[in-house]
Amino acid sequence: MSTINTLPTGVTPLAPLGPWVDHKHAAHVVQFYGEDDFLLDELSRFIGTALGAGEAAVVIATEQHRDGLARRLQAWGLDTSLALAQGRYVPLDAATTLAMISPGGWPDAVRFAEVIGGVMARVSVGSQAEPRRIAAFGEMVALLWADGKPDAAIRLEQLWNELAQTYSFNLRCAYPLSSFQREEHGDLLLKVCAEHSAVIPGESYTALGTQDERLRIIAHLQQKAQALETEVAERRRAEKELRRTQAQLETLVEQRTAALRQLSSKLLSLQDSERRRIARELHDSLGQYLVALKLNVDILRQSPERKELWSQSEELMERCIAEVRTLSYLLHPPTMDAVGIASAARWYVEGFARRSGLKLTLDAPGDPVRLPDAIELALFRVLQESLTNVHRHSGAAEATISINRSSDQVLLEVKDNGRGLEQEMLKRFRDTGAGAGVGLMSMHERARELGGKFELESSSTGTSVRIAIPVPPDCAPGAWHTRAKENVEEQITSRNSV
């Protein structure tokens, strides 16, 4: 049978007609489109050519596309009512037909052969000895795709190919390009194309008039695809790095949270320990003196003439006053407020040497240079904690204390001649900041809070604790003299009133 390239007399095509392929060379073509007008223009040429040549057409489409096709065919002057009466034209609703062949949402081979195969069998029978050629159009695959069932759509394409082994027809399927907007749709689009013998690209490509224009567009699309692949790869690397960084941050936050909880627990423990110590001091010293003083007062009520008891009571009161003053100084030495860390350290070292029996040597500036209160208090607490550790844990007979200040930092070092720390404990403290007791942890935190550095060195010949804290550049000697004088006078007045 010869190739048909023209419509019946009086019919004006909207665009050049494509060749009508002989039924012995059936084709399964997929068309991608962006706008409905492009789809309907191509479809009207495809179906109109077949009907105009006296052949058959089967259209399985949505109502909107069936109506649009009918208007275009009518504009061409084609009488579809005659083709319907002759059984050459069979328009079917895509959704209704899909429901008939897809029980449970999956295309059934038996139902497909009964329904679609039956339609093909009927329209192929003509008045002539040779069966009619059939132009078929189907949108059921597009409905499955839009419903999120790409595998079902591809299976339906395969059933069409299987049906082509029994009936000869030229089939055209159509998919809107909007169904392939995501990156992962690229592989699926290739699977769809693999089930077809030819592909009609979207209107942006087919509208080009010359082969040179099309080649230029292909090159441009290749460049875009390469740029997109590069961008996707970079985005994936960035997302991977972001996830890795996020995981690291989460781990760091968890570690810091755990460390803060541990520090909080240890600080509470240290606070409780300090309170127990103060309570013990009050009970063992001040409490005993007050009990003895109460007994003396009771006796003096009965025998006020006993002069020795008056003398003992006076001595007990002096001891009580001294104990209260000592506890007050230990909690916060007033000399530090008056004249600074050097004076407070000297007073504390002398008192600690008497109480502990340790031989202590202090090297501190003779004339105090005032530092910010927070720095001086941190240095004093580190000194207290260091000497307490020397006395309780080191087994040392002597220790040296030095306080030195440079232009940008102040350095406190306490060094003893004791047995030193266990190396495993020392390593764990350096690596994690934990494992060496509450005292060392508190010293480390005091240095960190002030932007300083805490160092701990230990061997079998002794231990060295060193804390270096940066000082503001404006903390030079000068205006502290007036405030120091006022503070000393205030302290003298306060002691006299006691």
Image (cartoon, grey):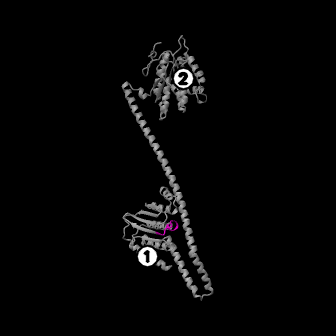
Q: Residues within 10 Å of mark 2 (few under 14, many from 20)?
A: many
Residue 299 position within the rendered picture, expressed as x and y whole percent measured from the top left: 62, 84
Mark carried by residue 160: 2
Residue 246 among those drawn in magenta: no
Task: Compare residues 453 and 154 and report the one nearer the observer.
Answer: 453
Q: Mark 1 or 2, which is nearer the eye? A: 1
Let me know if residue 394 is in the magenta part.
yes
Residue at 43%, 40% (x, y): give it: 234
Residue 450 image label: none
Sequence-wise first label, 1 or 2: 2
Q: Quadrant of residue 160?
A: top right
Residue named by callout 1: 488
Report the front residue among 423 and 125. 423
Residue 137 vertical placement versus 325 (above, below): above
Residue interval drawn in magenta: 390-398
Please, what is the three-letter code of the amino acid marked with disc 2? Answer: Trp
Give the amino acid type for the residue marked by disc 1 in the picture.
Val
Q: Is residue 466 left or right of residue 90?
A: left
Tell whether label 2 touches label 1 (CB within 8 Å): no
